[in-house]
Image: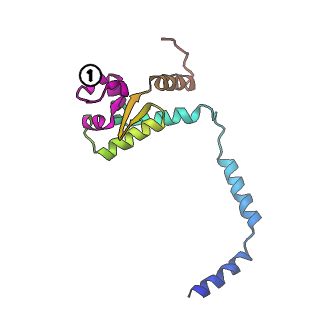
Amino acid sequence: MRAGRAARIPALHKFAKPDLHIGFFRSIYRCMTIDVDHDRAPDLDEGLKALVHPVRRAILAKLADPERHFVGQPHPLSFGVCAKEIERSCPLSQSSISAHLAALHAAGLVETRRVGTFVFYRRNDGAIEALIRGLAKSLGLPETTP
């Protein structure tokens, strides 16, 4: 059975016109592309995607004041907040919190520091401010200085 199947495959190739297929897909690609400012759109989009979920916004809010929300942490808060402490403060599973922290990290909204087997998270206020400025700029709002 395998030999019969292998014998049929070359027969299909003699009817295929590779130039026709490549040209067809290139024309579809040209029709689907949109001109985007690639310098700022991915960062803004990734940041906004990360902020869509309410748990991620809650994590960022708690990381703004770690002395208040994570008082029981045995490690110094100068390292950041241990991932285990963030998990304890949220009513979700460890894997869900880990995925949310990974999304915040990928967007650059939190910074990580690994010490041994522990991972500490700290809010990246500069990136959050840049995200807010980028959103205001993309919506055509006037710039405000704090």
Q: Hey, what amino acid is under mark 1?
A: Arg
Callout 1 secondary element: helix
What residue lies at 59% left-to-right and 31% top-to-bottom?
Answer: 40
Is disc 1 surrounded by few (<14), some (14 to 19) or many (20+) residues within 10 Å? Answer: few
Segment tinted magenta in the rendering: 59-88
x and y percent of residue 100 in the render? Answer: 38, 40
Magenta part, dominant SS: helix
Residue placed farthest to the top in the image? 146
Q: Left of 88 or right of it: where is 19?
A: right
Viewer-closest of 108 and 31: 108
In the picture as drawn, the residue positioned furthest to the right comes out as 19
Q: At 51% across and 11% down in the image, what residue appears?
A: 145
Residue 72 lies in magenta, yes or no? Answer: yes
The quarter holding residue 118 reads: top left
In the drawing, does residue 81 fall left or right of residue 48? left
Q: Residue furthest front?
A: 116
Reply above or below: 6 against 109: below
Relative image position of residue 122 (x, y in whole percent)? 39, 28
Decide which of 41, 64 is in the foreground and name it: 64
Residue at 64% x, 48% y is 32
Q: What is the x, y in percent for residue 70?
A: 27, 27
Rendered location of residue 138, percent (x, y): 57, 26
- The residue at the point 55 percent across, 16 percent down is 142
Left or right? Give the position of 109 relative to 88: right
**Residue 125: in magenta span:** no
The residue indicated by pointer 1 is 68
